[in-house]
Image (tube, grey):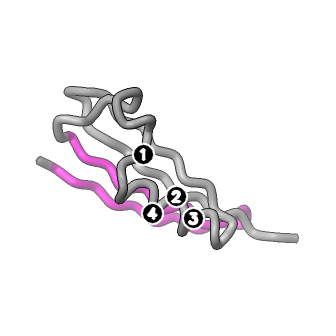
Amino acid sequence: IEIKIALETNAKGTELRVSDDGKGFSQSATNGYGLGLHAMKYRADLIGAVLRIDSQIGEGTRITCALRKQG
C-alpha cells in the first residue's frame, strides 16, 4: 500500500490530504464515518475546517481537511 500525505498553504487557507491506494471501503455501509473518521470530523468541526472523505472499494481512500483563512 502506498500512502501519500500533502500539506498545502496559500492565501485562501491550508489543506491537508492523506490518500492511499488500498482496498477502500463502502461509504454507504458505514454512512461515510466509522468511529475514527467520526472523531476526525468532530475535530475538524471544532477548528472550523471541512473534512471530506472519498473512498471506493478497490480504489483506495482520500481524506481532505481544509481550513480556510478567516477575514
Q: Provide the residue span drawn in magenta.
A: 2-21
Residue denoted by label 1: 33
Q: Is residue 26 above or below residue 4?
A: above
Pinpoint residue 28: horizontal percent, then vertical percent.
40, 27
Spatial CA span between label 3 and label 1: 13 Å
At label 1, which amino acid type do we have? Tyr
Q: Observer-nearest residue: 6 or 44?
A: 44
At label 3, which amino acid type do we have? Ala
Q: Pointer 1: residues within 10 angstroms few (<14), some, or many (20+)?
A: some
- Which one is in front in this view, the residue at disc 3 or the one at disc 4? 4
CB-based contact (under 8 Å), mark 2 and mark 4: yes
Q: Earlier in the sequence, mark 1 or mark 2?
A: 1
Q: Which mark is residue 44?
A: 3
Q: Earlier in the sequence, mark 3 or mark 4?
A: 4
Q: Is residue 68 above or below residue 28?
A: below
Q: Earlier in the sequence, mark 3 or mark 1?
A: 1
CB-based contact (under 8 Å), mark 2 and mark 3: yes
Place residue 12 in its image quadrant.
Answer: bottom right
**Secondary structure of the residue carrying numbered label 1:** loop
Residue denoted by label 2: 41
**Secondary structure of the residue carrying numbered label 4:** helix
Is 24 on the left or on the right of 70, as rendered? left
Q: Pointer 3: residues within 10 angstroms few (<14), some, or many (20+)?
A: some
At label 2, which amino acid type do we have? Lys
Pinpoint residue 65: horizontal percent, then vertical percent.
52, 58
Spatial CA span between label 2 and label 4: 5 Å
Q: In the rendered image, which quarter contains the C terminus?
A: bottom right
CB-based contact (under 8 Å), mark 1 and mark 2: yes
Spatial CA span between label 3 and label 4: 9 Å
Residue denoted by label 4: 39
Spatial CA span between label 1 and label 2: 8 Å
Q: Observer-nearest residue: 10 or 37?
A: 37
